[in-house]
Image (tube, grey):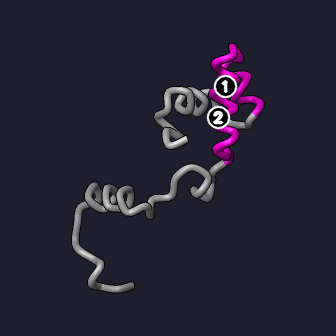
Amino acid sequence: VNPDHLRVGSHEENAHDKRISGTQPRGEQVSSAKLTPTDVREIRRLCLEGMTQKQVASRYGIGQSHVSQIVRESMWAHV
């Protein structure tokens, strides 16, 4: 670690720095991610075509609230 690249900051400032520098894992980069960008696009398509969020959630092994967040783009908004 190069100490010249470090500075003291609040948790909020550090989180912001991770987002703008690209060091914040997103999507399938997150080690616990169950979905891929292809899955996310398919989930949105299935919901648009009338499949219930509960049915989609069951198909992908995730919760209905997760499907809702994907459809609303509060999760996986970058896809």
Quarter of the N terminus within the rendering:
bottom left
> Which one is in front, 41 or 27?
41
Amino acid type, callout 2: Arg
Question: As displayed, is residue 69 above or below residue 33?
Answer: above
* Farthest top residue in view: 50
Q: To which residue does mark 1 refer?
A: 45
Image quadrant in which the C terminus is located: top right
Query: Of helix, strand and loop, which one carries label 2?
Result: helix
Residue 33: x %, y % from top left? 63, 50
Rendered residue at 43%/61% (across/down)? 22
Q: Are marks 1 and 2 in contact (CB under 8 Å)?
A: yes
Q: Is residue 74 magenta?
A: no
Q: CA distance from mark 1 to mark 2?
A: 6 Å
Identified by mark 1, the residue type is Arg
Main secondary structure of the magenta stretch: helix
Does the stretch in magenta take in 52? yes
Q: Residue at x 73, y 37 (%)?
A: 61
Q: Measuring 49% from the left and 32% from the top, which residue is drawn there?
A: 73
The residue pinned by badge 2 equals: 41
Judged left or right of residue 69, residue 48 is: right
Start-end of magenta stretch: 34-59
Question: Of all residues shown, which one is farthest toward the right?
Answer: 59
